[in-house]
Amino acid sequence: MTELGEHRYGKSAIRLVKLVRAPDGHVLRDLTVAVTLEGAFDRAYTAGDNSTVVATDTMKNTVYALAKEGLTASIEDFGLVLAEHFCGEPAVERATIDLREHHWTRLRPGQNAFRRDGEMTRTASVSVGSGGRSVRAGVADLVLMKTEGSSFSGFPRDRFTTLRDADDRIMATRLTGSWRYGEAAVDHEILFATVLETLLDAFAEHTSRSVQETIWIVGRAILERHEDVVEVHLSLPNLHHWIVDLSPFGLANDGEIFVATTEPHGSIEATVRRGA
Amino acid sequence: MTELGEHRYGKSAIRLVKLVRAPDGHVLRDLTVAVTLEGAFDRAYTAGDNSTVVATDTMKNTVYALAKEGLTASIEDFGLVLAEHFCGEPAVERATIDLREHHWTRLRPGQNAFRRDGEMTRTASVSVGSGGRSVRAGVADLVLMKTEGSSFSGFPRDRFTTLRDADDRIMATRLTGSWRYGEAAVDHEILFATVLETLLDAFAEHTSRSVQETIWIVGRAILERHEDVVEVHLSLPNLHHWIVDLSPFGLANDGEIFVATTEPHGSIEATVRRGA
Amino acid sequence: MTELGEHRYGKSAIRLVKLVRAPDGHVLRDLTVAVTLEGAFDRAYTAGDNSTVVATDTMKNTVYALAKEGLTASIEDFGLVLAEHFCGEPAVERATIDLREHHWTRLRPGQNAFRRDGEMTRTASVSVGSGGRSVRAGVADLVLMKTEGSSFSGFPRDRFTTLRDADDRIMATRLTGSWRYGEAAVDHEILFATVLETLLDAFAEHTSRSVQETIWIVGRAILERHEDVVEVHLSLPNLHHWIVDLSPFGLANDGEIFVATTEPHGSIEATVRRGA
Amino acid sequence: MTELGEHRYGKSAIRLVKLVRAPDGHVLRDLTVAVTLEGAFDRAYTAGDNSTVVATDTMKNTVYALAKEGLTASIEDFGLVLAEHFCGEPAVERATIDLREHHWTRLRPGQNAFRRDGEMTRTASVSVGSGGRSVRAGVADLVLMKTEGSSFSGFPRDRFTTLRDADDRIMATRLTGSWRYGEAAVDHEILFATVLETLLDAFAEHTSRSVQETIWIVGRAILERHEDVVEVHLSLPNLHHWIVDLSPFGLANDGEIFVATTEPHGSIEATVRRGA
């Protein structure tokens, strides 16, 4: 006997630009949207019956059409509009909308010309369904470095250990993080900005004895300062910067010249949440 | 009150080439390995206590060192060697090894020169821990196309639906799939090859009324023909090939000229498993 | 005084799939095409005068429309059809067509289902203009490795040199190469296949004292065996495979365990041609 | 007779981070460097004679070693230090150094923590040799958009033309540009910043009748305002934003909702220089 287990489907990489031609300057929104549906689609798999299968092409059309009226505030709010729309389809039990916003900065006052910021991507993941709704905000590809206040020592040594204790190392990462909001109504736009400031504050100010401790300190700071956040997930690759041995060339290297590497890299991720 | 939720860490993108200089020709193994540990590492996060934290640098060293004796058979077997090694560390409750094998083909008989195949990557994910062990084999980046025997029709139409029923469409995908083996001892090398043949057979021979049905048919074929497989997970992006409208140029286009696209794309994934 | 120097424009990344529904099986062609025009377009730059500027959207349409009748043989031949078409536009002095062909292999006899090969991309660059015409064929992303017969020694040593002489090293590369045909009419399809075989033969069979010597030997072999080729250009990054020091773990490593790297890498390129 | 034509070699993707631990705050430099040498290396190709071939590993060491004293000012200045060093090697006739600088911004005053900017990469290409020396500065991956003041009309119409005249379109591009300095001594750091401001000013303020005209206007502005620049090269892909047809959904779309695309894209590049 064979049976269908978990299944989901949707449309990914929907590239949407919305331009609001306001009299005092254009407002530019640039999103990449993915729609994922879960529900009673079993017979599409097992019987070739598409009668409940919302075409992914329809999902794409829906994103563009609803953007006209529905994309006026945050991507979290637009995600809710989309998720609730799709939950109105007969077979749908859960609709999840993943959004990435690419930010643009006006180049010069009075000119409708823009430059895309690239220092990170803002993300949101909104899910609506029978089991309730969930709104997560986050960031991706936020590249950070501490050149002071980072150490790693006291780890166990076995016969394969060659790494030395480091009292003062470079810690560099390409941070991906997201945080889930509770039930209370919030201003997603303001809250995103303030949580991000907290994240950057905590990263800048803390002393780290490991990437693990960094995750804990940053996650806890967000929870402590933002009561609307109930959980934080952080994923921090450890992008190693190795000191170059310059002694063959008769030169000292007192923490000055490094080789930046990406392969291999450490991978540390954890959730920090409000406890019971 | 703040608490630590789920957490894991490890080393990713460990690039390993092993060369066995056999008298009748070199044997080349080319792997990318990731190690992930779960366990009692809480105090590293919450107290900066690294006394149980196996350094990810040690993980890397271990992969290279154990490759010398331990990488003689399949990547699944090497994964087991590594996972069981790391489970010997005090705090570790579960060790997961993800492996990707890049296959090379001998260029000419009698010459130790090779060409890397690129039509797919073989994958394995091996997990050992207190809750038992799991061995998955799989493929990634297997790009497939059916130019006959694929349709999509009978889907619901709402006010955002513009897609027409298609009796005969191109179906193209970049397949990622994996399957989990049961408890019985198996020859991973032989089983991988035969499951892959089944997957390709089923993909080539079936008639598809949706990507969903394709997943079901391919997954079921694997389960039916390979009793050692207990579950199959398939993820098939739908890489649309749209017919180009040549009528403005006075030309017919009877399913002959297509534009291949990647953005947006459908995303369909499901698990097929043995039922009760 | 400011003047316009060299300029060119065109359309890139035109993704074209052509399907010929032959009775004994579909034939699948999958190309990425770029069109580049040079000519008397100065006034578009300096005066905003677009009266001679073939729209790049028109170029795209032309590629799709001409594919119907014009893409029956090799990509070189299709490139010539396109280049000659664009040379018929008033301002055009030179049209260059760059083509990449992605090869697909039939999965099973009798089934119109295919698997994309990924071990390399076939390329062509065809240029037609007032100064004559040029046809180049080539390959990209052909990943090759020699595990025997490669050395590098006798290089100069200065105060920054730490590399040791290597009598027996791994040589790995991601080869990009192209060769130009002379004036004689040739069968591009057959010639591509035989030149590629020569390239692979030479790579497999030769003994290399440097990547430079490899380029010379491979290029010369192509010129010697294929009189229709007048020039070969080869670009071979040197993708280093470093021996892992296993001695801290009490293990020998006699050319068995390597770390594969891509950053940094050597870059060696040269042209080999028929002399006077 | 076979002969060696043009040839060059070097080391690419050398990843260098330099950290200056100044009392009032760390200064972080993050570069990717490539070294390319041309010269009398023929016998390496044709005779396996490596006696003049500076090992690319030595090049890498040299970049790290010279960074200690030589990387104090601009990347152009560091490129000159490196190029002149390599020109001291016996066989070298020309040394070219390509540099990319990844900019980091201090996160918080008083903290040695940084965030990588991603809105562009600063580039330089410095070449020293028997034929003189050349210093180019530039930018890569600068993503810009004009939502007003861009049109494209009056282009020729043939039987493959379907594009309509556009009086008001979105123009988006990922700009790559570089400019060459003359012989006079300049402050590369200041000049880079001011040329970039001119580039952004011109892009923001001009009215464009084509991407071609944009290149001319931007290039001319740089030449007019910066006498030390003798030539500007600009490459502007045209990243099309197509208006989505919302009429099937009973909605107007007056330049509000767009789909952002990357395949296919226009490619326009030109040099603007001082005339006779």
Image (spheres, coloured by chain):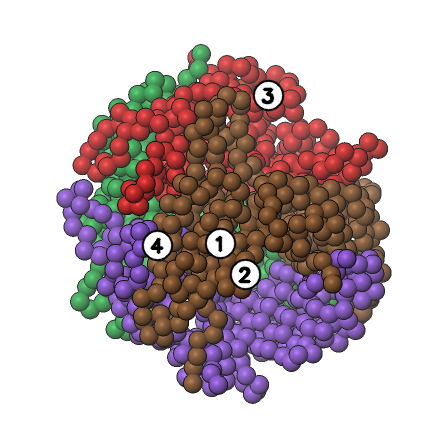
Chain colours: A red, B green, C purple, D brown
- How far separated are the C-alphas under marks 2 and 4? 26 Å
Q: Which residue has dot 4 on it?
A: D57
A177 or B143, nearer to the observer: A177
- Disc 1 marks a residue whose amino acid type is Ile
Callout 1: residue from which chain? D
Circle nearer the N terminus (1, 4): 4
Kind of residue at disc 2: Gly
Tag 1 near tag 4, CB within 8 Å: no
Give the quadrant of residue D266: bottom right
What number of labels is visible? 4
Q: Residue at x 61, y 16 (%)?
A: A184
Left or right position of D36 against B64: right
Q: Is residue C18 left or right of residue D102?
A: right
Q: In the rendered image, which residue does mark 3 sit on?
A: A194
In terms of secondary structure, where does tag 3 sit? Answer: helix
Q: Position of residue C238 (x, y in %)?
A: 38, 60
